[in-house]
Image (cartoon, rainbow, N blue to C red):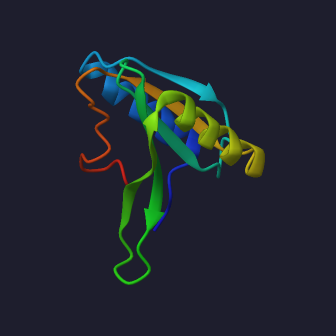
Amino acid sequence: MTRLTADFWVHAYLARLRTLNIPAFVTAHGDDTSGAVLVKLNTLDGQASAFQRSFDLMSGARKWDALVSGLEADVDAAIARQRNFDPDLWVIEVEDRAGRHLLDQPGLAD
């Protein structure tokens, strides 16, 4: 099965968020073709979560898992460590007081 490029997926995700008026920004531009993507959810109350896409070897399914949650500064530090390890990493920051990130919707784990 053909995988979408990281750049294509990021732009499609941002467009989906815009349809619900959920602000989101690319805070780190990774490799356009094969960069991994982290999504930071900022609930604008000092708390945040970071999500990464994972792959289940048994079922072949892709899903989004929480990498870290807690104080925004701690989440930012964890993301910075990931960026130091993987400079091709994309980081998208979603800002939503209700905690909406849409990563559980069909099509976003693919």
Does 91 sit above or below residue 25?
Answer: below
- 69 left or right of 85? left
Residue at the location (46% across, 62% down)?
54
Image quadrant where one finds the N terminus: bottom left
Image quadrant where one finds the C terminus: bottom left
**Residue found at the far bottom of this picture:** 58
Nearer to the camera, 46 or 49: 46
Does 3 sit above or below residue 18?
Answer: below
Res. 9 visible in picture = yes
Residue at the location (42% across, 22% down)?
46
- 21 left or right of 51? left
Nearer to the camera, 20 or 97: 97
- 28 left or right of 23? right
Residue at the location (42% across, 32% down)?
48
Quadrant in the rendering for residue 41: top left
Does 39 sit above or below residue 62?
Answer: above
Q: How many marks?
A: 0
Res. 31 visible in picture = no
Q: Where residue 83 sits in the image (x, y, percent)?
A: 70, 42
Residue at the location (63% across, 37% down)?
77
Q: Where residue 36 sits in the image (x, y, percent)?
A: 59, 50
Quadrant in the rendering for residue 74: top right
Nearer to the camera, 74 or 61: 74
Q: Where residue 39 sits in the image (x, y, percent)?
A: 47, 39
Q: Where residue 9 sits in the image (x, y, percent)?
A: 48, 41
Quadrant in the rendering for residue 98: top left
